[in-house]
Amino acid sequence: MATGTEPPPSRAAATGVRSPGRAAIAARHLRTDRWWLAPAGTAAGLLAFIAYSTWRAFANAHYYAAPYVSPFYSPCLAENCAPMRGGPNWELFGSWWGLSPALLILIFPLGFRLTCYYYRKAYYRGFWASPPACAVAEPHRGYTGETRFPLILQNVHRYFFYLALPVAGILTYDTVLTFRDQHYAWGHAGLGTLVFVVNIGLIWAYTLSCHSCRHVVGGRLRHFSKHPVRYRLWTWAGRLNAHHMRLAWASLISVAVCDLYVYLLATGAFDDPRFF
């Protein structure tokens, strides 16, 4: 039979899906759609963001245009930061730090996204073909999951979630500061204010839709009825979690757009349109 469990003799020494005891299907897969478009698009999107964010992180310039500060550089923890009136200037690293201050802070949001359950699926499929798509056999001879180094380090995701919360809080503070004009007078808003508000909304939605957040607020509870507040938070996190993939991409794009907007203002490409 075409779907018998005994593989042909020539495949007796094979591994993975070709190993003895697995369905003896000669074809690598039976899908007829363009299944490769999804992993290819994912890889292209992630590569584009990696290239852009790497350039901006090492640029060490054009990340502040009053009252806007790029989310890639906030909080600014080095002495060589651009002075930002009322902004997130915390000179924790002295003059000995000569590299871009973005490198001091990006490790936290990067670690949070790199270990995120959705992003793991995305780059495992897009870059490693593990597996490339549903019902498509992966090309690797063996499978160890995340039980060995370095992938066992993915288990630190819950701790990066705790670190991502204060970063999101600081970016919220930066968003509040955008309701000033270029002379730091309050009660004003420009197009950049709208860009920052949308960005911080997406960042919080992505952060709170995280699987770790859902577990923190409602995990390991034996009786929801005895913890009505945590149960309500758990249900809210669950609704957000259903959109985690969309929020992951939307927030990734929005943070890049936010940084690009600040860059264009700082380089004098155009002036920030003012609403009031």
Image: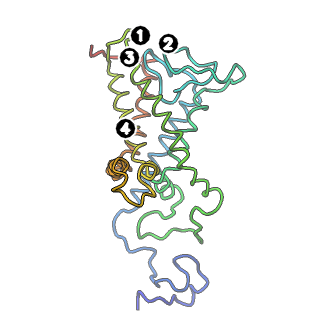
Amino acid under disc 4: Leu
Say which of marks 1 and 3 sits in front: 1
> Mark 4 or mark 2, which is nearer the start of the sequence?
2
- Please tell me the numbered disc located at residue 184: 1
Q: CA distance from mark 1 to mark 3?
A: 19 Å
Other residues around mark 4 within 10 Å, as few (<14) / some (14–19) / many (≥20): many
In the rendered structure, are the residues bearing label 3 and label 4 in contact, judged by CB atoms less than 8 Å apart?
no
Other residues around mark 3 within 10 Å, as few (<14) / some (14–19) / many (≥20): few
> Residue 269, image x and y in percent?
41, 18
Local secondary structure at mark 2:
loop
Q: Which residue was labeled with disc 4?
A: 202
> Mark 3 or mark 2, which is nearer the start of the sequence?
2
Say which of marks 3 and 4 sits in front: 4
Q: CA distance from mark 3 to mark 4?
A: 25 Å
Other residues around mark 2 within 10 Å, as few (<14) / some (14–19) / many (≥20): few
Amino acid under disc 2: Arg
In the rendered structure, are the residues bearing label 2 and label 1 in contact, judged by CB atoms less than 8 Å apart?
yes
Local secondary structure at mark 4:
helix
